[in-house]
Amino acid sequence: MISVINHDEAMTRLRAPADKVWILRIPGIGRDATARKLLRLAVLTLAKAWHGPGVVLNENSNLPVLVGAPWSLSISYDGLDGWVAWSASGAIGLDVEPIRTFPDMAEVSCQFLSAEDTFTSPIESPEVAFTRKWTTMEARYKLECSGASRRARVDHLRVGNCMLTVAH
């Protein structure tokens, strides 16, 4: 189960994470590299404050992974906001993308998605189907970088005009 929560509730959930995935939206991060670094630093600082100095941020794969914390996390950006997902029940991968169309969507689908993934459902628009499949691929990649299997459960949640996907 996925829950999108506010800042105050996040502070409570980080101290006593439940057996589900929690997601915090941080408005206004945008594409600013400094803001993104500050977000990763803030997450690390909180983790160290609650779980001790042995918690480190491993960014060997350019993906933040907390080592030594009793929960795992994943961070994503949708172009406007930052998103942080965490869970005490194992590794997770998060990807958030705005649902949009672009001229070479079919070409990108053929180049990056498997033939099975390029199938479009008759009940979804091509933009929604592409975004769901793209975020699934990205979330699974992030999960795999944390050492877990890509064959994990995948959940999708539409938030406004964004597709939020968690592999766990």
Image (tube, helix red, strand yellow):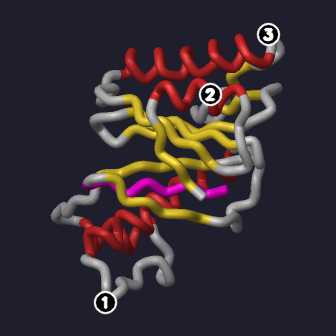
In the rendered structure, which amino acid carries the disc numbered 2?
A: Thr
Out of 24 and 145, give the one closest to the viewer: 24
In the rendered structure, which amino acid carries the disc numbered 3?
A: Pro
- The part of the chain drawn in magenta is 161-168
Q: How far apart are the alpha carbons under marks 2 and 3? A: 20 Å
Residue where numbered disc 1 is placed: 122
Of pointers 1 and 2, the one earlier in the residue sequence: 2
Q: Main secondary structure of the magenta part?
A: strand
Check the picture and name the quadrant holding the C terminus: bottom right
How far from the left and from the top, in percent, is residue 127? 26, 69
How far from the left and from the top, in percent, is residue 124? 30, 79
49 left or right of 43 in image: right
Hey, which quadrant is residue 50 in on the image? top right
Residue where numbered disc 3 is placed: 53
Q: Is residue 127 above or below residue 6?
A: below
Instruction: Give residue 21's mark.
Output: none
Residue at horizontal 33 percent and vertical 30 percent from the top? 27
Residue at horizontal 48 percent and vertical 36 percent from the top? 24
Q: Is residue 126 above or below residue 2?
A: below
Out of 10 and 83, give the one closest to the viewer: 10
Query: Under tag 2, what secondary structure?
Result: helix
Check the picture and name the quadrant holding the N terminus: bottom right
Residue at horizontal 31 percent and vertical 69 percent from the top? 128
